Image: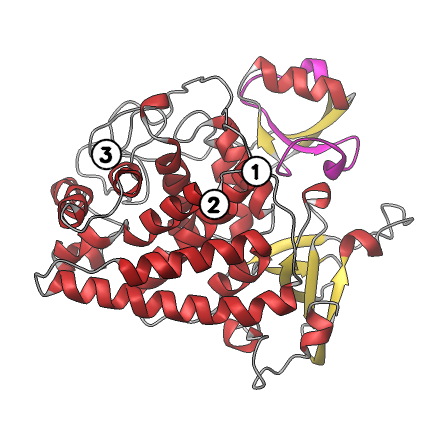
Amino acid sequence: MGVRQKKIAVQDLEIGMFVSDLDRPWHQTPFPIQGFHIRSQDDVRSLVTYCKWVVIDVAETRESIEQNKAGTRFVAGQSQRKGSSREAVQLPPLNIKEPVSYENVTTMKKELKVSRKVMMDAEVSLHRVFQAVQEGATPDLREVAAVTRRMVDSAVRNPDALLWLSRTRQHDDYTYRHSLNTAVWALVCGRQLGLNEGLLNHLGLGCLLSQIGKLELPKQILRNEGKLNADDFAIYRGYVDKGVARLADTGVSRAVISVVQGHRERHNGSGFPDGIRGDRIPLLAKVAGLAEYFETLIGPRDAGEPMTPARAVNLLYDMRNIEFQEDLAEQFIQAIGVYPTGSLVELTDGQRGIVVSHTPERRLWPKVMVMTDRAQQPLKSARIVDLAKYNEGRNADEALSIAECLPHGTEGLHPKHYDVTGAESRWNLSRIVGA
């Protein structure tokens, strides 16, 4: 069935309709993504404040999050408790005690030089921890705790550097990549929330260690992590408790253990291992769970088909107050952007490139490193286009925007070409970071 668009007055909106366009630019509204379902009358009231009319997709329907009928496959990155996957749970807004307001204090160019070494050291330290666990020994977490503090320092100074590396750097093992990238997403979100550096350290270390229990799972289950049957999923979900047990004698803080214990719980009780819900889930575990889920969507194991970051952001937004607390999901999207740093994109004029950075005020107009011409032929040297600045003073017909988010690994846009910190880079660093 095709999708037909229809222009209607805001007051005529009904729950379940999909809003695909507004009567004003999206970046002039508080809505964190472009295109969303109407889930409540609060959504309608919010739109009335900013718009007189909107465009809806008539044939657009909600994507089913899971199928729980007998014999169907389970997706390990999504919730599994039967009958509760779409139940909404409303909580009061998040209340961060004494939130910290962070500002970028260094340029991306300078921070990349530091954060690249940090990410390499993090992977090495994780390897040592995982190796110790596989050998049946109690892991020494001092090294990984120290590198976590360096990751926090980097995220506080300028989060774009870690985001860039998490999306463009090659890793030797899926588990290391998944753990590291989850920690980066979580730290960037925690920074947005205003968590102090002590809490950020607990959050980052918990994310790095959250997958440790998977080392005790059968390899066949891990290889099929994205498509498990009910019996295999019952075994799979035990990795959380296994990880907590492994960390019990390491001296790690209770806050870190709570992240490992709770990162697979979900807002409406549809998670595991305990099926707790709402405010019973510790805040750091909520952040870790959201970050881990997002990374699973955009970076599944080899057999899985990755979502584009933009589609993953849309899915998170549609899961507000269902699997993830509403304002936390919105803060996460505000932190990483509608097109997160490292997203491959095609512009409306046909040029292709990768998102370098963004600002909350211009969520749909990030900085893009353009690497091909309008015919998708590689440029001799990349150039940065700040879409927000480019579109200043231009009308809608002249504006340059992102037409679509491209899959990771799109032909001619492989991450190995984007290593902007070393001499081997094919791109000019000063162009990339606007120095």
Q: Secondary structure at mark 1?
A: loop
> Which residue is farthest bottom?
424
Q: Is residue 270 above or below residue 161?
A: above
Left or right: residue 428 versus residue 130 is: right
Q: Position of residue 339 (x, y in %)?
A: 60, 51
**Residue on which the image places disc 2:** 197
Q: Earlier along the polypeptide chain: callout 2 or callout 1?
A: 1
Q: Give how far apart the Cα atoms at labels 2 and 1 are.
A: 9 Å
Amino acid bearing label 3: Phe
* The residue stretch that appears in magenta: 10-34
- Disc 2 is placed on an element classified as helix
Amino acid type at circle 2 is: Glu
Q: Give the mark, 1 or 3, whose residue is nearer the N terminus.
A: 1
Foreground mark, 3 or 2? Answer: 2
The residue closer to the viewer here, 165 or 350, is 165
Q: Residue at x 53, y 36 (%)?
A: 193
Which residue in the protein does label 1 denote?
100
Q: Residue beneath label 3, please? A: 272
N-terminal of the two: label 3 or label 2?
A: 2
The residue shown at (49%, 62%) is 167
Q: Position of residue 308 (x, y in %)?
A: 51, 53
- Pointers 2 and 1 in contact (C-beta within 8 Å): yes
Of residue 288 and residue 418, the one placed in the foreground of this image is 288
Quadrant housing residue 431: bottom right
- Is the C terminus in the top left, top right, bottom left or bottom right quadrant? bottom right
Query: Residue 134 sits in which quadrant?
Result: bottom left
Q: Residue at x 15, y 64 (%)?
A: 132
Q: Residue at x 92, y 48 (%)?
A: 393
